[in-house]
Image (tube, grey):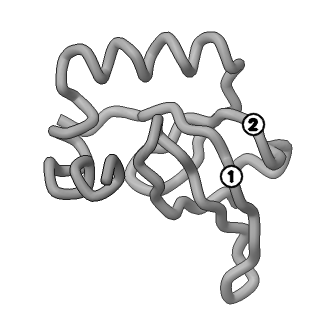
Amino acid sequence: MCLGVPGKVIEIYESDGIRMGKVDFGGLTKEACLAYVPEVELGDYTIIHVGFAITKLDEQSALETLELFNQIGFIEEEFGAADAEASSA
């Protein structure tokens, strides 16, 4: 299953003219394309789907969703157990 996952934008940069960012998913950090949501700024939460930010999200909703995903083991399933273990080390 492939769902959108909320994450916090912790870095914004350009790569080959494309707006990119590093996004924190409750301890696991991944790179994502931010081109589709130009209004997203450093510190904002966004929904990431297959490596692309698709919408801006308020912090409370993002944190509640991340907590639920963690409770059901979705973060490990979506990103892989090895990634989750490496991020917690």
Residue holding disc 1: 10
**Mark earlier in primary sequence (2, 1):** 1
Three-letter amino acid code of the residue under disc 1: Ile
4 relative position to 22: left or right: left
Categorize mark 1 by other alpha carbons within 10 Å: few (<14), some (14-19), many (20+). some
Give SS at disc 2. loop
Residue at image point 75% right, 77% down = 14
Looking at the rendered structure, the kind of residue marked 2 is Asp
13 or 2, which lies in front?
A: 13
Circle 2 residues within 10 Å: few <14, some 14–19, many ≥20:
some
Tell me the residue at 43%/34% (across/down). 5
What's the distance in space between the residues labelled 2 and 1, CA to CA?
8 Å
Q: Position of residue 22 (x, y in %)?
A: 59, 60
Residue 10 pos. (x, y %)? 68, 52
Q: Which mark is residue 44?
A: 2
The percent coordinates of residue 72 (x first, y second) are: 19, 16
Residue occupying the far bottom of the picture: 16
Q: How many marks?
A: 2
